[in-house]
Image (spheres, helix red, strand yellow):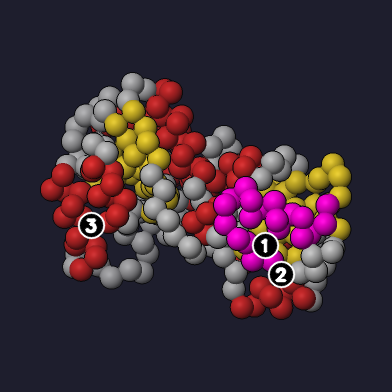
Amino acid sequence: MQLNELNQYLTEYLQPASFSDYCPNGLQVEGKPEVRKIVTGVTASLELLQQAQAADADAILVHHGYFWRGESEPITGIKMRRLKFLLANEISLFAYHLPLDAHVDIGNNVMLGNVLDLEITGWLDGGKNMIAWSELKQTKLLQTIADECSAKLNREVQLVGNGSKPVRTIAWCTGAAQGYIEQAITADIDVFISGEISEQTVHQVRESNTAYIAAGHHATERYGVQALGEHLAKQFDFQHEFIDIHNPV
């Protein structure tokens, strides 16, 4: 399909103008006018760009793109090498941050719930679709929840809390969403799952009834972009490949 048609469809499907974000969402680097194959990944690192070029991709779609608010503006160093590679190979780059987190069908939060076998009971953030929560049909021990997360994400998670605590309610938000634990505490949620953890999070857990599982920023945000790529491949006549660049964070 044509690049401008893909850009228009993604704009309509993800509604980036509805979000006040930390970066521009949408087409960040323009490449070939026709898209035959798209590669998806979490972050537009140079390694992802190189592997996408080796896979003969015409466009790359990521969750973490470029031009973040507050970053240095000059096109030098790492930024220069990434942009030079894309432009030299005429590969387009699409990036969607908050619009991909919050999408009700293929968003990171919805897809993480699917991976962890958690049925969404509701949202803790007034319809913004950023903090999902689930009420389990049967109570489980906190350590069991942590072990299941490690197995399903293929990554050892970090647990803060008493492993023998009974859990009936779970809330989650992917990526660097540790600050949302305050909403989980207010809602008296048994355990909150996110990607990262901060120093103060430990004290918030110790002084509340809510436990915390840090499951990895990269690990929790692998699924929305994959689902978006699969959705596009079904809608249009091109190939899709997800490339996972290992990141321990």
The quarter in which the N terminus is drawn is top left
Residue 116, how many percent across, how many down? Answer: 66, 45
Instruction: Specify whether 244 is left or right of 125.
Output: left
> In this view of the protein, can residue 26 be seen by the observer?
no
**Disc 1 or 2, which lies upstream in sequence?**
2
Residue sitting at x 27%, y 56%: 46
Residue 12, how many percent across, how many down? Answer: 42, 33
The majority secondary structure of the magenta stretch comes to helix
- Please name the amino acid that badge 2 sits on: Val
Image position of 57 with respect to 127: above or below: above
Quarter of the image holding residue 237?
Answer: top left
Q: Which mark is residue 160?
A: 2
Q: Which mark is residue 213?
A: 1
**Disc 3 or 2, which lies upstream in sequence?**
3
> In this view of the protein, can residue 230 be seen by the observer?
yes
Question: Which of 149 and 10 lies nearest the eye of the viewer?
Answer: 149
Please report contact status of discs 1 and 3: CB closer than 8 Å, yes or no: no
Image position of 58 with respect to 217: above or below: above
Label 1 element class = strand
**Magenta segment: does it hold 146?**
yes
Residue 57, how many percent across, how many down? Answer: 26, 37
- Farthest residue to the left: give it: 88
**Residue range corresponding to the magenta coloring:** 140-159
Judge the density around disc 2: few (<14), some (14-19), many (≥20) Cα neighbours within 10 Å: many
- Please name the amino acid that badge 1 sits on: Ile
Residue 48, how many percent across, how many down? Answer: 32, 51
Residue sitting at x 29%, y 31%: 37
Residues at marks 1 and 3, CA–CA distance in whole angstroms: 33 Å
**Magenta segment: does it hold 114?**
no
